[in-house]
Image (cartoon, helix red, strand yellow):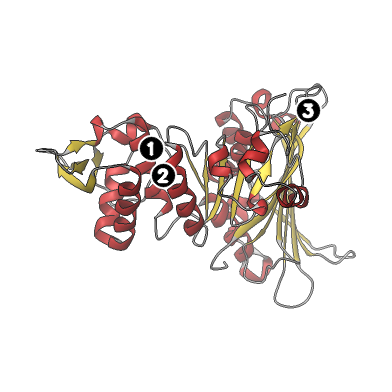
């Protein structure tokens, strides 16, 4: 696997509102648009791919409410198709990315998969999975390959084919499956994040319910990262001096405390505001020195003071050097800090309800920015770039 693997594009057909979209992705990608435009569904596609690796296909579909809630219900959609183009395996690059295609039809009873990735020399490797038959061939047009029978047609190739020998493509699929299964879609549950954490010495989980444990682990194993979190929290919270920890008597549970100047006692995180807890969870994820390969964050601005968004954008940019970042936001203030190449505008067809992503090209965003004295967020909020309620 490459040192910094990343997705270059995510193409989706027939998944909820995503009738036919192709989402370009860079080191930092920010989705904006009105409610119902498909931002959350882009993140849900990533969640679904992770589920297909962790479970069999029927279970993954049930995790999303069954076929009727997974597939687009427009009376026309017969299949859900997902294509991921990425630079993951050792020889992949911008002009020859890895490619994974998953097609599911007949209410999840039929699935087709295709893996394509570059080898060091000669034609690339292509592996297809149809039912219980996997065909291992090359990207040459006349390649017939050889067939391999799988034990279970309900388990995706991402789960089973990493067991293949390296020269048959197993190593490439293993790299790709490890990359996808390691993606993290962060959606902090503030009530859970406030609570004491059992000590497991773990990284932050997706709902941030182990926030205290994750923070204490960073203080002990990555003191510079912990110091950066304290610095950013002080920049956003007037009066904050430092973070402290206390262990509940008779337990292995730890509580985060805020030490503020001028107060006689520490403030337990259970007493802190919604925005304070959520900001702390976000910064804990973004300053993780060994993060997931891709970190996605739903409504990153939710509960945060506009001033804190400057700090958050700086943290996002720094984190994007270690992990690919995909976030959704409704904040013009945050968007003002972005570059045109980092913004993906989402919209919705008023007649069909289908998402339009991207609703405007990166070139058109750059052109509008050059022609105006307004910031990028102001242009979007004014409707110049689309992606606002009509």
- Quick one: SS at disc 3? loop
Report crowding for label 2: few under 14, some 14 to 19, many 20 or more residues within 10 A (C-alpha): many
Q: Is residue 385 above or below residue 288?
A: above
Can the viewer see residue 55 in this picture?
no
Labels 3 and 1 touching (C-beta < 8 A): no
**Element class at badge 2:** helix
Q: Is 68 left, or right, of 327 in this rendering?
A: right
In the drawing, does residue 162 fall left or right of residue 121? left
Dot 3 or dot 1: first in sequence order is 1
Q: Are marks 2 and 1 in contact (CB under 8 Å)?
A: yes
Residue linked to disc 1: 278
Q: CA distance from mark 3 to mark 1?
A: 33 Å
Quarter of the picture containing the C terminus is top right
Write the residue at 14% across / 41% down.
262
Is residue 209 something one can see in this rendering? Answer: yes
3D distance between C-alphas at marks 3 and 2: 32 Å
Which sits earlier in the primary sequence, circle 3 or circle 2?
Answer: 2
* The N terminus - image quarter: bottom right
**Mark 3 Cα-neighbour bin, 10 Å: few <14, some 14–19, many ≥20:** few
Instruction: Tell me the residue that label 2 is attached to.
Output: 282
| Residue bearing the label numbered 3 | 349
Residue 219: percent from left, percent from top: 26, 56
Q: Quadrant of residue 305?
A: top left
Mark 2 to mark 1: distance in Å?
Answer: 6 Å
């Amino acid at each position: 696997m490459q040192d910094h693997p990343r997705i270059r594009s995510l193409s989706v057909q027939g998944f909820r509102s995503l009738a036919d979209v192709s989402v370009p992705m860079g080191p930092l990608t920010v989705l904006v648009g009105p409610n119902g435009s498909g931002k959350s569904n882009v993140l849900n596609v990533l969640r679904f791919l992770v589920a297909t690796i962790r479970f069999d296909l029927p279970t993954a579909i049930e995790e999303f409410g069954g076929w009727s809630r997974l597939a687009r219900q427009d009376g026309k959609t017969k299949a859900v198709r997902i294509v991921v183009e990425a630079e993951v395996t050792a020889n992949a690059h911008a002009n020859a990315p890895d490619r994974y295609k998953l097609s599911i039809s007949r209410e999840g009873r039929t699935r087709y998969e295709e893996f394509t990735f570059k080898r060091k020399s000669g034609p690339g490797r292509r592996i297809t999975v149809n039912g219980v038959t996997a065909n291992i061939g090359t990207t040459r047009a006349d390649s017939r390959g050889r067939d391999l029978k799988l034990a279970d047609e309900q388990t995706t190739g991402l789960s089973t084919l990493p067991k293949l020998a390296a020269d048959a493509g197993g190593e490439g699929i293993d790299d790709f499956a490890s990359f996808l299964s390691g993606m993290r879609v962060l959606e902090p549950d503030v009530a859970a994040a406030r609570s004491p954490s059992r000590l497991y010495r773990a990284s932050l989980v997706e709902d941030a319910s182990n926030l205290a444990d994750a923070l204490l682990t960073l203080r002990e194993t990555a003191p510079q990262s912990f110091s950066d979190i304290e610095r950013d929290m002080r920049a956003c919270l007037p009066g904050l001096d430092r973070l402290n920890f206390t262990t509940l008597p008779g337990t292995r549970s730890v509580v985060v405390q805020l030490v503020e100047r001028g107060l006689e006692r520490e403030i337990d995180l259970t007493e802190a505001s919604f925005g304070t807890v959520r900001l702390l969870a976000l910064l804990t994820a973004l300053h993780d020195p060994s993060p997931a390969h891709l970190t996605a964050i739903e409504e990153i601005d939710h509960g945060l003071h506009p001033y804190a968004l400057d700090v958050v954008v700086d943290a996002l940019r720094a984190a994007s050097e270690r992990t690919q970042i995909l976030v959704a936001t409704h904040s013009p203030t945050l968007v003002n800090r972005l570059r045109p190449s980092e913004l993906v505008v989402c919209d919705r067809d008023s007649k069909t309800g289908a998402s339009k992503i991207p609703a405007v090209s990166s070139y058109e965003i750059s052109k509008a920015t050059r022609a105006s004295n307004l910031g990028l967020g102001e242009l979007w909020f004014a409707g110049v770039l689309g992606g606002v309620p009509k």
